[in-house]
Image (tube, rainbow, N blue to C red):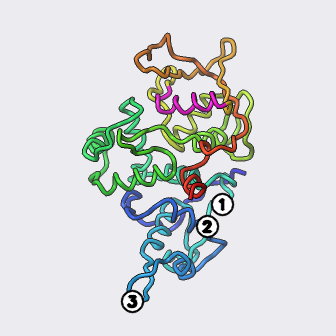
Amino acid sequence: MSTTYTPATNKPDKLLTGFISVRAPELKHIYGSLQGTTSVSEVTSKFGRPATGGEVKTDHVEGSLRFLNAVDLVESPTGDIKDTVEPINERHFEGLPFEARLLYHCNQQDGRQSHFGDVHRSLLSEGSRTVNAGRDNLRTILKRETDYDFSWTDEKIDMWVTLCEQLGLVSETEDGLVLSPCRAIMYDALVLAPTSSGEDAGYDGETVENGEFRRALNWINDNLFTVYKARTGTPRLHPAIADVLRNMEEDGVLSLSAPGDAQNQVEVPPADLDDDVRGNRRSVTHVSIHSRPDETAYQYPLDQLLTHQ
């Protein structure tokens, strides 16, 4: 079910990437524990960490609640986020996994908080599957591609990379920052996105027959994460996104097609980017989404971690 998205009240002014200690596992567990209006003391007693002298460390819990408040997932009915909290927007895309929901909420923020979504867009502007993950290099890209009245410190960049890696949007390896999202989040993004005229985004089912590919990608690009290398004229998928869709099609999870002289094409670059010229790009207009496989590759990183413990 898709209902109206409601911004939280009394949100903190702190930049999303300024919550440098926030981690996705804690956000997921804390958010999942909230059942209606809950006292913060109850949350901190459940998720606090033992400290010296028999005390309980709670800063990480309070920081997580403030972050969830900043992205419209919780608010305080008393107006004091240190007193009570309750989940909001629960029926907006009901059933959507937490990772995709959190990424969606982060990308609904405006003003200076839109910087969170701008990081991914900026990195994909390089046009390559992987970028040098050195913080000086990432800072150079962000300074060139964005214009905000704050500095892109290592701490802000680290926070974004860590959180987005835990959500499955990117992965950091010895070779650099891999910009391909995990198959789980790509699958949920396509299921969530509208695929026909007049349809709203919604997470009501997990199969689609001959949906409009560009319509789905446009919504994902505007609400979840960047998918295009170029959007003017005939949109062209970024190679990091094309790789994931190619893998999913090989798995039999997706079917991409372009029947007849269909309009609204999207160009998909070849696997070998040395051959990435117009004549070698695949034109796609429709997508069919089949059932999600019960395989590790279609789990989120946090679920994979729990499965293999």
Mark 3, mark 1: which one is toward the viewer?
3
Label 2 belongs to which residue? 87
Q: Residues within 10 Å of mark 3 (few under 14, many from 20)?
A: few
Mark 2, mark 3: which one is toward the viewer?
3
Label 1 belongs to which residue? 90
Image quarter for residue 182? top right
Q: Residues within 10 Å of mark 1 (few under 14, many from 20)?
A: some
Callout 3 amino acid = Gly
Residue closest to the eye, 110 or 140: 140
Does the magenta run of residues contain 240? yes
- Residue 4: percent from left, percent from top: 65, 54
Please tell me which residue is depicted at 65% across the width and 43% down the height of the picture. Answer: 295
Residue closest to the eye, 128 or 103: 128
Does the magenta run of residues contain 184? no
Label 3 belongs to which residue? 53
- Residue 119: percent from left, percent from top: 39, 45
Quadrant into which the C terminus falls: bottom right
- Looking at marks 2 and 3 on the same chain, the residue that comes earlier in the sequence is marked by 3
Quick one: SS at disc 2? Answer: strand
Q: Which span of residues is magenta-colored?
A: 237-251
Find the residue positioned furthest to the top.
279
Q: CA distance from mark 2 to mark 3?
A: 33 Å
Mark 3 and mark 1 residues within 8 Å of each other at the beta carbon: no
Check residue 21 in the rendering and tell me which mark sits there, or answer none: none
Q: CA distance from mark 3 to mark 1?
A: 39 Å
Residue closest to the eye, 188 or 55: 55
Please tell me which residue is depicted at 35% across the width and 54% down the height of the picture. Answer: 158
Where 138 sits versus 65, above or below? above
Q: Is residue 115 left or right of residue 38?
A: left
